[in-house]
Image (cartoon, grey):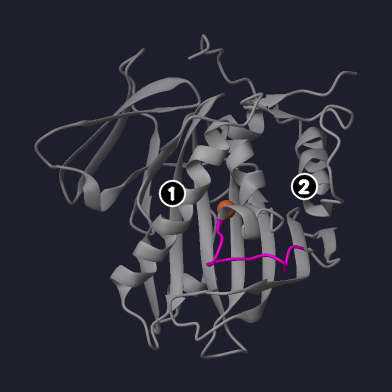
Amino acid sequence: MSKAAPCRDRVLLNDWHVVADRANLSSAIPFETRLLGVDLTIDCRDSHHTEVVRKDTGRPVNRAVRYGFIWACLGKPERDIVFVPEAEEADRYLVTGGSIAVKVSGLRAVENFLDMGHFPFIHTGWLGEEPHTEVPPYNVEITAADEVLATECRFYQPVASPTAKGGMMVDYVYKVIRPYTVALYKTNPLHPTRKDVIVLFVQPVDEEHCIAHPYLCYLKDGMDAATVRGFMQLIFAQDKPILENQMPKRLPLDPRAETPIRADAVSIYYRRWLRDRSVTYGAIPARR
Ligand SMILES: [Fe+2]
């Protein structure tokens, strides 16, 4: 592990980050984790008491419980926790996909989540298969809410979802909501007018380590919660070794650093958006 440098990015210090899946914490044993290079202890002795304390100063930090996760903000929260409207719809399962530690910058994990091009090669037989390797052109924009939005993404998938019956063209929408938070909206095979939602909350442990906390909001019809979770874990287990082999481990933001082999519009937007917001933590900043 590289020597941890302190995070100086205001946009990250003053934002909320997931630091644990509440359901996995014990009331008897404090839970230890790390956020932005700062060691934290989470103490939840009972359902009314959750405290997140910095180990270096012994001081509590801002904490919250939402969507089944414990959240922390090391600085002064400037924005609310990301709002997930689908979490309020009663006909959806709301499940976490587990907390998956990955030895790579969380920005790399977000970028990989946005990349459809790897489906036929990494998720062979599930999210893609040869010869259907082409990513058709799609739209990317920065929204009024300052998010990176990719729409009209389409891809052929053999098993797009646990309820999919055979291969189908799948419609995707991607949205980068915060530097370390990305959402995917995917056509539900049984309800083509509605979408299943996966929000990937990435905990920046330090610049080269992250914990991915997938949050799944899937329509219940034809499904059970364990299958939703299992499918996510299967797919993410295929991504983890690929992510951990990426070099460098931090995400280069210099446009000249890594020439994309194929036109990867959303990735180019994401990197530019990070540069414009002065995000450097987990990145190799662009030369000025
Ligand atoms: Fe993947």
Q: In which quarter of the image is the C terminus?
A: top right
Residue at coordinates 77% horizontally, 23% vertically from top-left?
285
In the rendered structure, the answer to whether residue 147 lies left or right of residue 281 reads right
In the rendered structure, the answer to whether residue 79 lies left or right of residue 279 reads left
Which percent across, then down, holds residue 249? Answer: 61, 26
Vertical position of residue 51 compared to residue 38: above or below: below
Which residues fall within the magenta stretch? 123-133
Name the residue at the front extreme.
131
Identify the amino acid type marked 2. Ser
Q: Nearer the viewer, mark 1 or mark 2?
A: 1
Residue 267, labelled with which disc? 2
- Main SS, magenta region, reads loop
Give whichever of discs 1 and 2 has the lower sequence position: 1
Quickly name the residue at label 1: 237
Q: How many marks are shown on the rendered structure?
A: 2
Magenta stretch: residue 129 in it? yes
Query: Which image quadrant is residue 158 in?
Result: bottom right
Name the residue at the top extreme.
3
Q: Is residue 127 visible?
A: yes
In the rendered structure, the answer to whether residue 276 lies left or right of residue 65 reads right
Which percent across, then down, holds residue 225? Answer: 31, 72
Ligand 1 within 8 Å of the CB at mark 2 = no
Q: Is residue 84 visible?
A: no
